[in-house]
Amino acid sequence: MLLEKTINELAEGLRKKQFSCENLVKECYENIEKYNKKINAFITIIDKKTALKNARKKDKTLSKASSKLHGIPFVLKDAYVTKNIKTTSASFVLKEYIPQYNATVYQKLLDAGAILVGKMNMDAWGHGGSSENTDFGSVKNPYNLERSAGGSSGGNAAAIASRMCVFAIGEDTGGSIRNPASWCNISGLKVTYGRVSRYGTIAYASSFDSVGPMAKSVEDLAIVLETIAGKDKYDATSSPNTVLKYSQEMTKPIKDIVIGIPTEFFGKGLEKEVSDEIMAAIERMKTFRVKFKKISIPLFDYGLPVYYLIGPSETSSNLGRYDGIRYGQERRFFTDETARRIMIGTYALSSGYYDAYYKQAQKVRTLFIEEYKKAFTQCDAIIMPVMPTPAVKLGELLNNPLLNYLADIYTVSQNPVGVPSLAIPCGFSKEGLPIGMQLVGKMFSEDLLLKLGYHYQSITDWHKKSPGLISK
Amino acid sequence: MSKKTLLTKEEILHLAKLAGLTLSESQLKRLPNDLSSVIEYMSKIKSLNTTGVKETTQVTNLKNVFREDVIEKERMFTQEEALSNAKNTLDGYFKVKAIFNN
């Protein structure tokens, strides 16, 4: 199957005319037709004829100067606006919304010659970690159809795992790329805040939202990142820092790197199977020039309150614009979970509670930034779990909001700080469910994280495994 | 911690009004408990000493990002485009409920 190949292999094969963009896109649609009914990863599937026509055009225009992403099929979380293509954020509030312009990340991929095949299912507005809080039916995990694919970018992860596309663009506000990546055995990168433009991203919490790639391997993530990163005049928070050639940087040897193991992240609540696989990964990584060191992040327990006070506060403000005037549907179409987050935010921002909740959370956010800075004086990267357990059963978290939020404990503290984090596969549970780990780095250290991930994947093959669903 | 709900039905209704949300009967039944349990958990943040700590509102380290004050025609919507997702329009305008009395 062509879709088992890396972007580098595909780019080479296309150039050597071993196969065509049309072959590749056709294969995506074959898999979509076979598996999407089972996993419900898509909200919008781009018309097959249109995509194939596009692919044939790409076959004709392929040249020496073409990007490696030329002719490569991809999908977008349905949180990115796409001109003339329905964009819903998985909410009936935007059921019929047809954007009049393109998100920067989408435009950059179009400019590189990549081919969009679909807009993906997710937790509505990014509100959730299981892709069940959606008005389009929950996403199923390709490794076990009774389990969640994770969220909020669950459709992305499920589609990559089922080989319906080569890569995807997710959005991570408190784990939304890393969580589904780890539950579906793929790789995902939450970039440094501002590394990729947010222009045209439907906002959840604007000071946390980060746009990033998801793919089968770290090697693929690097190629996508170097295409989408950079300053955008339409997003004042996008960073002017130089975009590195990540795909070249990552292949260089690792030199004397220290990785911190934060004690608090391996304590109560973490399932033993997950912890064991990460410890095994640590042992494997010792074969590189990497040293491991126990560190402490005493504020760990306060990550959830910081996230779940500031995130909902920002979302209550951001979602204020859906007034039924410019986008069609009324506010009564918000799901229960979205209503809860808007209400929590409204509470934290309301007079009498503002100082004790919102303002206090913003102060603790400062303490978190200092704490991560302090940790990075002792190490270059930090290793930690992504999720406390492998994929949960569908419905398990849906009706208990607090329990639902507690599952995010390892992924919520990086977004308020802004630091990047790479989620990669590191094993399977006894039941055959994927387990992931994350490597967190200093601001703008994507090059180091990708290098560590690339080298790790060069000695392991977890990331090459695909679900039984597609081999049957 | 006490089992008593932090938020009453009346407070929920007030919050919903502030947030511009109309709640269904079933939402109204569950929300006092749901929100109270979440807010009670998040309240532990109050116990941290933050005297003298400044708030962080954004993490870009950027200040005063300016752009030229010029019109970019290529990014402008036509009137038709601007109204293309609106359900209620009149003579090329958004139609909304009156907010002033005659």
Image (spheres, rainbow, N blue to C red):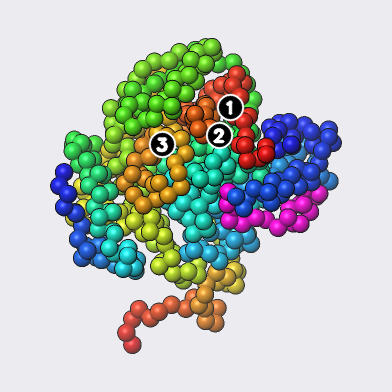
Instruction: Give the residue pinned by disc 1.
Output: A462
The numbered mark at residue A411 is 3
Question: Seen in the image, is B55 located left or right of residue A3?
Answer: left
Q: Residue furthest bottom?
A: B102
Q: Which label sits in the foreground, 1 or 3?
A: 1
Quadrant into which the N terminus of chain B falls: top left
Amino acid type at circle 3 is Thr
In the foreground, A126 or A230 = A126
Chain assignment, label 2: A
Residue A224: quarter of image: top right
Q: Secondary structure at mark 2?
A: loop
| Residue at x 38% of width, y 55% of height | A337
Residue B22 in picture, x, y percent from top left: 34, 69
Determine the secondary structure under disc 1.
helix
- Type of the residue with mark 1: Trp
Pointer 2 residue:
A185
| Number of dots carrying numbers | 3
Instruction: Check if mark 2 and mark 1 are on a common chain.
Output: yes
In space, the residues marked 1 and 3 are separated at their CA atoms by: 21 Å
Please give the chain letter of the residue carrying mark 3: A
State the separation of the CA atoms marked 2 and 3: 17 Å
Mark 1 and mark 3 lie on one chain; the one further toward the N terminus is 3
Question: The magenta stretch spans which residues?
Answer: A39-57
Q: Are marks 2 and 1 in contact (CB under 8 Å)?
A: yes
Q: Position of residue A446 (x, y in %)?
A: 52, 30
